[in-house]
Image (tube, rainbow, N blue to C red):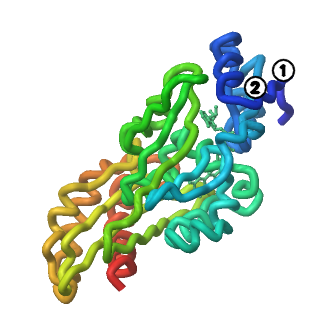
Amino acid sequence: MTLPPFDLHRPRSLEEATELAERYGDDAAFYCGGTELLLLLKLGFASFGHLVDLKGIEELRGTWADNGTLVIGAAVTHRELERSELVRERLPALAMMERSVANLRVREVGTLGGNLCFSDPHSDPATFLLAVDAAVECRRGGGQPRRLPIGDFVVGPYQTSLVPGELLTAVRIPALPEGAAVAHAKFSFHERPTATVACLARVVGGSIVEARVAVGSVGARPVRSSAAEDALENTPVAELEGVLEDAGERAAEDSTPVDDATGSAEYKAQLVKVLLGRTLREAIA
Ligand SMILES: Cc1cc2nc3c(=O)[nH]c(=O)nc-3n(C[C@H](O)[C@H](O)[C@H](O)COP(=O)(O)OP(=O)(O)OC[C@H]3O[C@@H](n4cnc5c(N)ncnc54)[C@H](O)[C@@H]3O)c2cc1C
């Protein structure tokens, strides 16, 4: 497998990156870690005369707190997130989720932005980010940033709502509600996850007053299951086991599992039920 020839561009600003994308149009592609894009080129599934490397754009790097919101630059790698002191302090579940992505070699170079922009249905971060109500920020050159919920950004398999020349610049995660905890779990037997579930639970006075259930990797795109959330909300923690079966069935139905190389739809529905129980128990522990 060898890479076909291309011109490499290394812009230093968002304006420069957008200008290059506009100049070369369909013959140009952005890339960051290259773990997805370069593989596609090597396998002959895509071909571009110009690659625009985003790693040198300072604005896409770094992780910081904006009041209660955790802001992560699109070019931050999985490994940087896994090891970030700020992330471990503010949202340890995010660091733990990142530690489970791929393998060390991929995590060293693969970025959060690249993962979301590639929009592979088998993604850990997209599922996790749905459960924590994350938003993304996108920008085209020097234009105004466009902020949208993660659920409106990842619109389908290998499809996002980015417009030509627009970059994903950052992911914004609001502080969890007081008393809430989040947990993420997945099952995989190939490289990519077969099923991913992330749950947020807020317990007040011994009852679950808020539940968020996100399911990914089983269907065309990750989704929140409002039906499962309804089944869980206002349930006393002591009675959780009694509602889990129903909540799991609702989550499996809402996630619309499909048959693919990672398993049958029926098998994935069963995995969703198991992972929902595991993540919820962890979130309320
Ligand atoms: C062996 C293997 C195992 C894996 N296992 C898992 C797993 O367990 N869980 C999981 O979630 N993922 C998994 N992945 C996916 C991995 O997380 C992604 O490959 C990685 O995060 C992609 O980041 P990148 O920077 O390398 O993307 P790139 O390959 O650089 O880019 C991917 C796509 O996004 C576009 N792009 C990148 N950055 C931007 C931006 N800022 N703005 C606009 N467009 C952009 C590019 O044009 C390209 O189309 C696995 C991948 C491999 C190869």
Percent across and percent down for residue 33 are 73, 44
Extreme residue in the front direction:
67
Q: To which residue does mark 2 refer?
A: 51
> Residue drawn 49% across and 32% down?
145
Q: How far apart are marks 2 and 1 (CA)?
A: 6 Å
Q: Do the residues labelled 2 and 1 touch (CB within 8 Å)?
A: yes
Q: To which residue does mark 1 refer?
A: 7
Establish if 84 lies above or below 239.
Answer: above
- Label 1 sits on a secondary structure element that is strand
- Label 2 sits on a secondary structure element that is strand
Percent across and percent down for residue 231 are 15, 67
| Image label count | 2
With 126 as the anchor, is 107 left or right in this view?
Answer: right
Q: Which of 239 and 149 is in front in this view?
A: 149
* Crowd rating for badge 1 (residues with CA inside 10 Å; few <14, some 14–19, many 20+): few
Amino acid of disc 2: Leu
